[in-house]
Image (cartoon, helix red, strand yellow):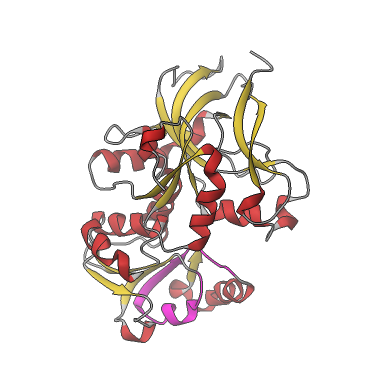
Amino acid sequence: MKNEKMRAVQYSKYGSPDVLFESTISKPVIKEGELLIRIHGSSVNSMDTLFRSGKIKTLTGKKFPKGTGVDFSGEIVEVGSSVKEYQPGDKVWGMLPMNLRSPIGSAAEYVAVAPEKISKSPNKVDLLQAAALPGVGATAIIALKYKAKLRKGEQLLVRGAGGGVGSIAIQVGKMLGAHVTALANEKHLTSLKKLGADEVYDYKKTSSTDLKKFDVVMDTVGTDLKHYRALLAKNGRMVTIGFPNLTSLAYIVSSSIYGSRRVRVFSANPKSKLLKELAYYVDLDEVIPVVDSIYSLSDSAKAHHSLEAGGGLGKRIINIIEKKDSLSK
């Protein structure tokens, strides 16, 4: 029904997390090839803070308001006439298309999305916990299984292992049979051991020169890439998901001269097949969600502040269907 309203988090100017506000906007009306999903949980990713800050406003543009949030979990409430593989009541997860100028993100009560951007969610975790996984899980799988082609018995270094992607990369690395070394905040080292890391090091006390050679380096930080690429063994591969400054970006581009030992960079934009693969691993207990904290929709700014402050372990989750006694901060 048209003109129904919903809650959503938006911003009307670039800036700190304090520019975020809860708004009441029109509920999406689906097209014949779309699904309407009632969102249970969303998460905060580094790209969300990057877009909101205005650091790439040449790409995100000047049109406001904008929505925030990309990945989500929820329940289908309406199915377009041409969609055959889903029905109302199905529990799903996924990621919205990378629309940098959209007024609606996944920090909202409802989204309209095409079937190829979702899959059934895993059975082993509830929908709120599942919200921690689509973006970071897909990123870790693409990076290690498909980009780096990590093999059983190889040595893997995960830099920034306590973050959303890093904490899943440890698990994917172990699932693929690698010996995993984690570089992270000292306070998380015990937890990372429990996630499967074979060796753990405090990044503040360990420099790249203190480490051995690795077949694969998974970097989630994006700085000092030259020093960490130097840790690659013969035929080693390095994958990064971060390039926080022009110096890092320039090095990534110039690293092509190293052939197979170049720095590979990418941004995950998974479709159904990869999301199904991730759900399969979750149901096998090969991958579990790592949740740092949970916030209500109205406290989304606090979640952004927390991510930017750093130091957490895993993901910050937005609980769209609020249950006050379940929220933790």
Which x, y percent locates residue 100?
66, 46
Q: Hey, which quadrant is residue 174 in on the image?
A: bottom left
Q: Nearer the viewer, residue 24 or 154?
A: 24
- Residue under the point 78% across and 49% down: 62
Can residue 110 be seen here? The reply is yes
Give the residue displayed 41% in from the left and 82% down from the top: 230
Q: Is residue 290 left or right of residue 152?
A: right
Q: Quadrant of the N terminus?
A: top right
Q: Which residues are magenta?
A: 222-244
- Is 47 located above or below residue 326 in the figure? below
Determine if residue 241 is in view: no
Task: Kindly identify the residue that appears in the image at 29 percent across and 46 percent down.
Answer: 288
> Is residue 231 inside the magenta stretch?
yes
Coordinates of residue 221 in the picture (x, y in percent): 47, 68
Q: Is residue 300 above or below residue 184?
A: above
Residue 34: x %, y % from top left: 57, 24
Between 131 and 117, which is closer to the camera in this rendering? 131
Query: What residue is drawn where x is 67% and y is 49%?
Result: 19
Q: How many marks?
A: 0
- The correct choice, above or below, for 34 with respect to 136 in the image is above
User: In the current view of this chain or complex, which residue is farthest to the bottom?
Assistant: 209
Q: Is residue 127 magenta?
A: no
> Residue 52: horizontal and vertical position, in percent?
64, 52
- Residue extending farthest to the right is 62
Q: Is residue 104 left or right of residue 46?
A: right
Along the viewing direction, whichever of 180 and 108 lies nearer the viewer: 108
The answer to which quarter of the image holds residue 149 is bottom left
- The answer to whether residue 44 is above or below residue 224 is above
